[in-house]
Image: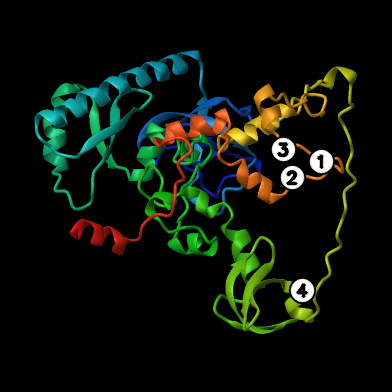
């Protein structure tokens, strides 16, 4: 940057103060010197003269160290007034319209994937910078583009600057890949640090592209947040696939856990076991105390919480249908558990064998003589079976006898 406000070391450098300013929201800090007569505070706007022209900048830091910039440090011209702020707001509205005009021109002239992301006017409106995104291997004739597009912007000098995917994501902003409402680059990151795949491997993160890349298509900026912590922890632990001696014997390291300062070792005939760094150094297993927590009944039982339940007898399972005899036996038992008196017909009582004087039954010879006398019950059974009453059933002829009868 060159301007009339260049500071020379032959001046009294001890009287100058240095501040950090930003030209864009959440942008990089640039150091400028300020004379003691100017009193500025954080959040004030100042007018500075840079290589891009006269610009309005926001004071972001006070009493900073210029970090050896030396003669490259420029001087703040003055504190911005109300007129400067109004011109700055008007230029922002013109920048939005300029982006639409440039993208329309690119689309009508078939420039392919080349797009305009943002434009920036100087405070006096004499120069406009167009921020464009395109790949390095794309053939883009900047001179012919500026010559053709300048017809839409009279009395303004145009300049093109190529920006990368991360800068585009910062300007566009929006929802982050992790689900945050605003991306880290457009929320608090002022500079983009270099990020490598080695950081993801050190943190044992899945190397799936969708897991480690952001909206910009590059490695996520958050991979660097805890990178130093993991690197410091990994220096004190053995590496993976290394043979180590443990309190249970020698084994091979299969996994490293940096945050818990421990490793998982695969022991022969035992299996994987976790050991801390102290256990590996001392060779003594640490006995972790077992803490029993007393159960505290926080809920007080109330009588309103008791629910009365009516227990009914279980229904009988439907099984086999009982036979006639079993049904008659069950009918004999009433609800009180006592047998019902068996009602016998007069005819059954007459057919009942008479007992002798001594109370004994009639002998078998007497019963044989009474076989011809059948009860009504046996008569009904014989009629049902289709045979004549009183006729003995006899022995069923064998198969050979039936064949001889048919041959006759």
Q: Position of residue 176 (x, y in %)?
A: 45, 37
Of discs 3 and 4, which sits in the foreground? 3
SS class, disc 1: loop
Q: What whole-number distance in Å separates the C-alpha atoms at marks 2 and 4?
A: 104 Å
Q: Which residue is mark 4?
A: 278
Mark 3: give few (<14), some (14-19) or many (20+) Cα within 10 Å.
few
**Where is residue 156 shown, x and y percent of the image?**
24, 25
Q: Which residue is mark 3?
A: 353
Residue 386 placed where, x, y %?
A: 39, 35
Q: Earlier in the sequence, mark 1 or mark 2?
A: 1
Residue reaching furthest to the left: 109
Mark toward the start of the polypeptide (1 vs 4): 4
**In which quarter of the view is residue 305 placed?**
top right
Q: Judging from the image, what secondary structure is the residue with disc 2 in?
A: loop
- Dot 3 or dot 4: first in sequence order is 4
What is the spatial separation of the Cα atoms under label 3 and label 1, in whole angstroms?
A: 10 Å
Task: Return the residue at label 1.
Answer: 356
Residue to which mark 2 is pinned: 362
């Amino acid at each position: 940057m060159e301007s009339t406000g260049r500071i020379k070391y032959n001046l009294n450098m001890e009287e100058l103060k240095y501040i950090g300013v930003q030209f864009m929201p959440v942008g990089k800090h640039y150091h400028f010197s300020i004379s003691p007569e100017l009193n500025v505070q954080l959040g004030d706007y100042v007018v500075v003269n840079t290589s891009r022209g006269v610009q309005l900048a926001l004071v972001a830091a006070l009493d900073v160290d210029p970090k050896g910039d030396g003669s490259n440090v420029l001087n703040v011209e003055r504190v911005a007034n109300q007129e400067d702020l109004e011109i700055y707001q008007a230029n922002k509205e013109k920048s939005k319209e300029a982006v639409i005009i440039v993208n329309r021109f690119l689309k009508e002239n078939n420039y392919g994937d080349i797009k305009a992301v943002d434009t920036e006017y100087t405070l006096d409106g004499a120069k406009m910078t167009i921020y464009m995104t395109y790949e390095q291997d794309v053939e883009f004739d900047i001179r012919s583009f500026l010559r053709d597009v300048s017809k839409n912007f009279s009395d303004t000098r145009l300049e093109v600057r190529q920006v990368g995917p991360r800068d585009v994501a910062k300007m566009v902003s929006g929802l982050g890949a992790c689900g945050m409402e605003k991306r880290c680059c457009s929320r608090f990151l002022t500079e983009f640090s270099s990020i490598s795949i080695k950081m993801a491997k050190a943190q044992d993160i899945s190397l799936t592209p969708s897991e480690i890349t952001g909206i910009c298509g590059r490695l996520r900026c958050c991979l660097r947040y805890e990178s130093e912590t993991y690197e410091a922890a990994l220096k004190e632990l053995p590496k993976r696939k290394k043979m180590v001696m443990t309190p249970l014997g020698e084994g091979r390291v299969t996994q490293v856990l940096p945050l818990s300062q421990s490793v998982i070792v695969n022991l022969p005939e035992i299996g994987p076991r976790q050991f801390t760094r102290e256990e590996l150094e001392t060779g003594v297993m640490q006995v972790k105390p077992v803490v029993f927590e007393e159960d505290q009944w926080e809920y007080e039982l109330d009588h309103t919480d008791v629910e009365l339940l009516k227990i009914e007898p279980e229904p009988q399972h439907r099984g086999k249908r009982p036979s006639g005899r079993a049904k008659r036996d069950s009918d004999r038992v009433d609800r009180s558990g006592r047998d019902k008196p068996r009602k016998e017909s007069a005819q059954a009582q007459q057919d009942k064998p008479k007992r002798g004087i001594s109370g004994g039954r009639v002998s078998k010879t007497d019963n044989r003589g009474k076989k011809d006398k059948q009860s009504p019950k046996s008569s009904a059974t014989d009629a049902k079976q289709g045979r004549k009453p009183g006729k003995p059933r006899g022995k069923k002829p064998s198969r050979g006898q039936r064949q001889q009868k048919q041959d006759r």
